[in-house]
Image: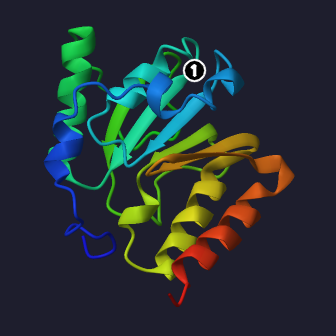
Amino acid sequence: MAEVNENRSFAASDFLNHPYPDAESNAAILLPHLKPTDKILDFRCGSGIIAISLASRVPHGAVVGIDFAPNVISKARASLVDHYRWRATYPPGHQHPPEGAIIFHLVDSIVKLPYDDNTFDVVYASDMFIQIVTETLSVEVLKEMMRVLKFDGFLFTRDIAKQHLFPSNLGFGTQLTQNLLRCFCRSD
């Protein structure tokens, strides 16, 4: 897919084979804000390990991991089978995941998600913005994240060594957009 840099300095296999990522190491500042009924979107879910780890924090909620790379979604689904010893099936055409579900969907675009507005309590993205090729696309992705996020939800991003938690009802999505634009539009 041309909208994300696949020629980055690290190999895609690093994400597919990393054995120990979990919510505690990758989303520590988010965890105290999770409620047992939250619906979480793991944006570009990679191996699925973090989504599975987040699911243990929302036993009456649901976690949906999305990616546009078929081999990545296959790995995430295999991680789910390995972790739970069963295969979760849930048709991707449905808007609202059932309680307790962990679902991995292959999506066609990261700027046009197949979910209604205000679907998720939490949108989580790890090491995603560093892979996006243009600042325009970064802003479009952020707008899409905010569209599917509930008004009182949390947007959590993690890139390289920093974690960011933005309560959507306080307008921090706008602040994040401005910060991303400053970062991507630097002349140095």
Residue at screen point 41% across, 52% down: 127
Residue at x 25% of width, y 13% of height: 83
Q: Residue 37, located in which quarter of the rendered image?
A: top right
Q: In this orientation, which residue lies closer to the viewer: 111 or 165?
A: 165
Quadrant where the N terminus is found in the figure: bottom left
Can you tell which quarter of the image residue 120 is in?
top right
Q: Can you give x and y, in whole percent of width and height, for residue 27 in the image?
A: 53, 32
Q: Can residue 87 be seen in the rendering of this structure?
A: no
Q: Is residue 109 left or right of residue 98?
A: left
Q: How is the image coloured?
A: rainbow
Q: Is residue 4 above or below residue 56?
A: below
The amino acid marked with disc number 1 is Gly
Residue 108 visible somewhere in the drawing: yes
Indicate the position of residue 78 as horizontal and vertical percent values: 17, 26
Extreme front residue here? 188
User: Looking at the picture, how far across and down is residue 162, in whole percent?
Assistant: 54, 48
Q: Position of residue 19 (x, y in %)?
A: 22, 26
- Residue drawn where x is 22% and y is 64% of the image: 9
Disc 1 element:
loop
Q: Which residue is mark 1?
A: 61
Question: Closer to the camera, 84 or 47?
Answer: 47
Q: How many marks?
A: 1
Residue occupying image coordinates x 47% and y 57%: 113
Task: Count neighbours of disc 1 (C-alpha within 10 A) and say few if under 14, some if 14 to 19, many if 20 or more.
Answer: many
Q: Residue furthest bottom?
A: 187
Q: Closer to the camera, 20 or 39? A: 20
